[in-house]
């Protein structure tokens, strides 16, 4: 109960979304932003069960605005919740928000729940108009296994789910190497490395017949740079696919955390890195030599949303935002963001700085809520299509992972 009250308190403080100004950025020790030696307590983060109860409570009070369902079940047996505002409609903008695909990246979970409450319970004209123009779905905790991991009775979230590798379950010979998404030391999968461009792909030893040999040629995860597709091995990735195929969204926000970076030659810590293009301009080549293209319009849309976010929030927080490093990791076809783009859905990758004080964590949550709201409003008003995409190249790129005090 204390955790629910804490969450509601945070909601009251935050939502102010459509106009409240947040404190400025900075790297002063003890200030609002994350410091390298600090850690966030998970005592205020809802469990999967508490998340489900909170969503159901909001649904019951939403007067039919919100529908909450169990979209799937994790490898460890936890329900995967989905919160739906509206049904797929060709005359509305479909937007998907995915969070907590990495179990220890928790600010997206909190921001999603706060935003769900805001959309469900607020009756101002902007919210009503947004929900009339947009169908918005949230997957607030896609990796409950990782988020709920415990060690010696203490909750210690980590990146992975809890699932082993049994090749015979996929009609593959015993001893077939696991897909690179599998991390045997952790005994689990990095869910955001288990995605394939083909939403109908099913891993089976007979499709193609050379699959076992192909798996054997992929470098181990220790050396892997993200050049090939994943295989939808995990139930969590398959749940995402089911949701995506039902909505077929125009846009997706993917909420993550990262380490400490600075942009350019400056010493200001990057608080959030943004990316609007998760694949290369010419697409990717799958493991069998076939080129998988991506629409230029999809790339442009992702960049426009990043620019809109940067312009709406960056002025309030100088130095807080940067562009995510565009390298092999950013353009990995194994990630959900790439799968979305290959299926005509623009993306914005949101990478908040990892770890810090509760105060810093709360600021990250607020920033993400504001970014979500600005994105929803830009689609609802159609202003997103008027954004100058060229500004994307002007956003400073984060280049160093070294903290400079």
Image: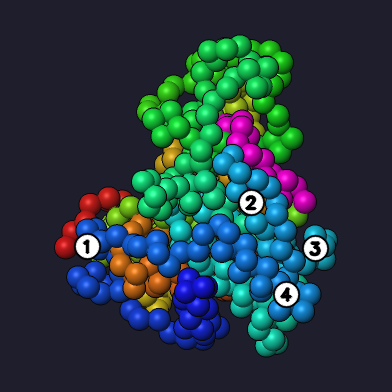
Which is more toward the observer, 332 or 296?
A: 332
Q: Callout 4: helix, strand or loop?
A: helix
Q: Is residue 29 among the parts visible in the rendering?
A: yes
Query: Which numbered disc, 1 or 4, marks the residue closer to the eye?
Result: 4
- Predominant SS of the magenta segment: helix
Q: Which mark is residue 201?
A: none
Q: Which residue is mark 2?
A: 79
Any magenta on residue 230? Answer: yes
Q: Is residue 90 left or right of residue 317?
A: right
Residue 367 sits inside the magenta stretch: no
Numbered label attached to residue 60: 4
Q: What span is in magenta?
A: 229-246
Viewer-nearest of labels 2 and 1? 2
Q: Which residue is mark 3?
A: 87
* Quarter occupied by residue 174: top right
Q: Residues under labels 3 and 2: Cα distance?
A: 21 Å
> Which mark is first along the chain, 2 or 3?
2
Residue pictured at 72% horizontal, 58% vertical: 69
Quarter holding residue 27? bottom left
Tag 3–tag 2 contact (CB < 8 Å): no
The quarter of the displayed image where residue 272 is located: bottom left
Q: Nearer the viewer, mark 4 or mark 3?
A: 4
* Residue 54 pos. (x, y %): 61, 69
């Amino acid at each position: 109960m204390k955790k629910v009250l804490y969450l509601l308190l945070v909601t009251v403080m935050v939502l102010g979304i459509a106009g409240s100004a947040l404190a400025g950025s900075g790297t002063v020790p003890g200030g609002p932003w994350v410091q390298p030696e600090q850690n966030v307590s998970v005592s205020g983060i809802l469990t999967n069960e508490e998340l489900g109860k909170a969503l159901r409570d909001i649904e019951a009070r939403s007067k039919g605005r919100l529908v909450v369902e169990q979209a799937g079940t994790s490898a460890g047996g936890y329900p995967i919740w989905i919160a739906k505002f509206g049904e797929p409609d060709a005359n509305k903008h479909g937007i998907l928000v995915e969070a907590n695909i990495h179990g220890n990246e928790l600010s997206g979970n909190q921001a999603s729940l706060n935003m769900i409450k805001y959309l469900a319970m607020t009756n101002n004209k902007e919210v009503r108009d947004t929900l009339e123009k947009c169908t918005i779905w949230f997957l607030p905790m896609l990796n409950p296994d990782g988020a709920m991991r415990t060690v010696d009775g203490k909750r210690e979230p980590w990146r992975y789910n809890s699932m082993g590798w049994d090749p015979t379950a996929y009609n593959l010979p015993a001893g077939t190497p696991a897909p690179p998404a599998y991390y045997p030391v952790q005994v689990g999968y990095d869910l955001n490395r288990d995605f394939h461009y083909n939403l109908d792909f099913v891993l089976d030893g007979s499709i193609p017949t050379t699959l076992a040999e192909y798996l054997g040629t992929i470098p181990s995860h220790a050396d892997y740079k993200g050049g090939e597709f994943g295989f939808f091995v995990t139930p969590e990735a398959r749940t995402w696919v089911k949701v995506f195929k039902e909505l077929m969204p125009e846009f997706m926000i993917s909420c993550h955390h990262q380490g400490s970076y600075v942009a350019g030659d400056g010493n200001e810590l990057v608080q959030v890195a943004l990316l609007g293009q998760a694949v290369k301009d010419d697409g990717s080549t799958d493991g069998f030599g076939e080129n998988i293209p991506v629409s230029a319009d999809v790339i442009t849309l992702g960049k426009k949303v990043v620019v809109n976010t940067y312009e709406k929030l960056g002025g309030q927080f100088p130095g807080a935002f940067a562009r995510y490093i565009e390298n092999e990791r950013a353009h990995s076809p194994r990630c959900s963001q790439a799968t979305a783009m290959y299926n005509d859905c623009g993306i914005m990758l949101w990478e908040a700085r990892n770890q810090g004080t509760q105060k810093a964590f709360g600021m990250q949550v607020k920033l993400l809520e504001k970014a979500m709201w600005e994105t929803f409003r830009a689609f609802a008003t159609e202003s997103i299509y008027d954004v100058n995409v060229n500004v994307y190249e002007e956003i400073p790129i984060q280049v160093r992972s070294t903290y400079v005090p």
